[in-house]
Amino acid sequence: MKEIPIPYVRSNQAGIVIFLIAFFLTQATWIIAALFVIQVIGLIFGAKANLFIRIARPFLTQLVAKSQTEAAELQRFNNSLAVGFLTLSLISLLFGWTAAGNIFAAMMGAAAFAALLGYCIGCTVYFQYKQFRARRLQRG
């Protein structure tokens, strides 16, 4: 199973939080659009293509060597959720639905901030999804 070092995962989460703070301070839709592009590139091409990871990599070499890892499958699921929330936020903002755009961005920010603090909401959703699939397969 492919693994991603946790410092790389955290650098992506920190980048998301920083961009979202900048968005909430400025209400500039282009920040959500840029964050969306960064996350889509990471989703399509993998963690090594993620801009936040690429920027942080030179500073994390020693940490990565002795760090734990997380499953790439789980991180891909979490990245898919991030892209989903950013898509909803960006579409809402482009249609002028500022409140909805801010709510979706806030949900994304809360999830990323919680993950930085040690609780992965996406991981919980992923676990529940896997449990649901397993039960459904057992029933036939």
Image: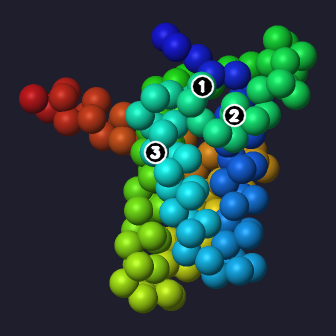
Quadrant location of the C terminus?
top left
Q: Amino acid at mark 2?
A: Ile
Q: Amino acid at mark 1?
A: Lys
Which secondary structure, mark 2? Answer: helix
* First in residue order: circle 1 vs circle 2: 1
Name the residue carrying label 2: 53
**What is the C-alpha distance between the residues marked 1 and 2?**
7 Å
Q: Position of residue 24 (x, y in %)?
A: 69, 77
Badge number at residue 48: 1
66 in relation to 113, above or below = above
Residue 49 appears in the figure: yes
Badge number at residue 16: none
Q: How is the image coloured?
A: rainbow
Name the residue carrying label 3: 40
User: Which quarter of the picture shows residue 105?
Assistant: bottom right
All told, the count of numbered labels is 3
Q: Is residue 120 left or right of residue 40?
A: right
User: Residue at the location (50% across, 55% down)?
Assistant: 36
User: Which quarter of the picture shows residue 111?
Assistant: bottom right
